[in-house]
Image (cartoon, rainbow, N blue to C red):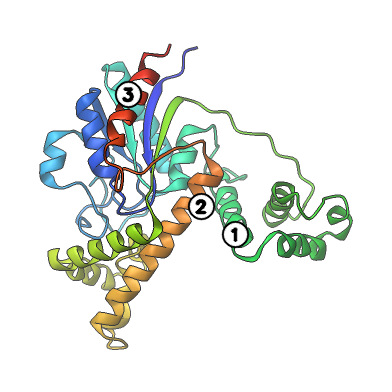
Amino acid sequence: MKKKKVLVIVGPTAVGKTALGIHLAKMFNGEIISGDSMQIYKELDIGTAKASSQEQSEIKHHLINQIDWKNSYSAADFQKEARSQIDLLTANQKLPIIVGGTGLYIQSLLYDFQLGGSEDEAKKLEIRAELELDYKKNGHLAMWQKLAQLNPSLSDKIHPNNVRKVIRALESHFLTGNSEQKEQPPELLYDPFLIGLTTDREVLYQRINQRVEMMMAQGLIEEARLLYESPHVQAAQGIGYKEFFPYFKGEQTLEESVAQVKQNSRRYAKRQLTWFRNRMAVSWWDLVQDPANEQLLEEEVKKWLEKK
């Protein structure tokens, strides 16, 4: 059976995903499905960097402003609803365009992961992402030594340089207590074209800092105060909100809270890049410093669409 085509735009925060998604949707008769874990919430517009009202009027957006911010939303919820939207858009001759930076959501959508069951695939992906970040920070030998402490006999069979096997063994241990559990690669359910947006790290960090300043001017503090009144809801843990809670409590200055938002946003951007580079076959583009590449990208998308 022929797999449905799905265009996917991923990458770190503040790199231009929204603008590119709208541009390509206009060019290729598409509609946008948000692949961001926070944009599903009503009333949280500034801190989640939703497309503006003007942008949403130009191209139809899905999975934005759908649930009350006091409710919870999971990768399994997203997987179910986004797949339904893909089916509807494809049936209506529209190109589904997933735009977002939540790696777990994107991966659980495109691959045959069974979420929400006793073998919770979402938990597996989260553990794997943490282990891969641990590897990036501490190196392969530290990872192998961790495995050696947990399962000496198995570590003797895996060379310290075989990072992939070491990580899989650790992942299995933290999930099941059995380091030697085998894993079957998940099936890719669609025919995706994965566009990854990136740019020079210093340029990206500058854009993130500027975005935070712009959000403050737009009223980010009011959204944060809304969540401060209900700190136990899932949305209150979002970057750009929780950092203001100490300010509201009188424990730090507003300037310190804003600086924390910027720092956490930069760290999140780094984690996003690590996830997409390690976990998915992404075609990377820098349209910030090389905007002329956009025409080349358009041509690549056109070739993919024409390919049967």
Mark 1 vs mark 3: in front: 3
The earlier-in-sequence mark between 3 and 2 is: 2
Q: Residues within 10 Å of mark 2 (few under 14, many from 20)?
A: some
| Type of amino acid at the residue the image marks with label 1 | Lys
Against 82, residue 172 (above or below) is: below
Nearer to us in this view, 147 or 163: 163
Tell whether label 2 touches label 1 (CB within 8 Å): yes
The percent coordinates of residue 81 (x first, y second) are 36, 35
Nearer to us in this view, 103 or 120: 103
Report, in whole angstroms, how far the alpha carbon at label 1 lies from the one at label 3.
34 Å
Q: Residues within 10 Å of mark 3 (few under 14, many from 20)?
A: few
- The residue beneath circle 1 is 136
| Type of amino acid at the residue the image marks with label 3 | Glu
Report, in whole angstroms, how far the alpha carbon at label 3 lies from the one at label 2.
27 Å
The earlier-in-sequence mark between 1 and 2 is: 1
| Type of amino acid at the residue the image marks with label 2 | Thr
Q: In the image, what residue occupies the spot 27% across and 49% down?
A: 67
Q: In this rendering, does residue 231 appear at all?
A: no
The percent coordinates of residue 166 (x first, y second) are 74, 52
Q: In the image, what residue occupies the spot 53% across and 28% down?
A: 188
The earlier-in-sequence mark between 1 and 3 is: 1
- The residue beneath circle 2 is 274
Q: What element carries label 2?
A: helix
Q: How many marks?
A: 3
Q: What element carries label 1?
A: helix
Q: In the image, what residue occupies the spot 85% across and 53% down?
A: 154
Q: Residue 299 carries which label?
A: 3
Q: What element carries label 3?
A: helix
Residue 20 lies in quadrant: top left
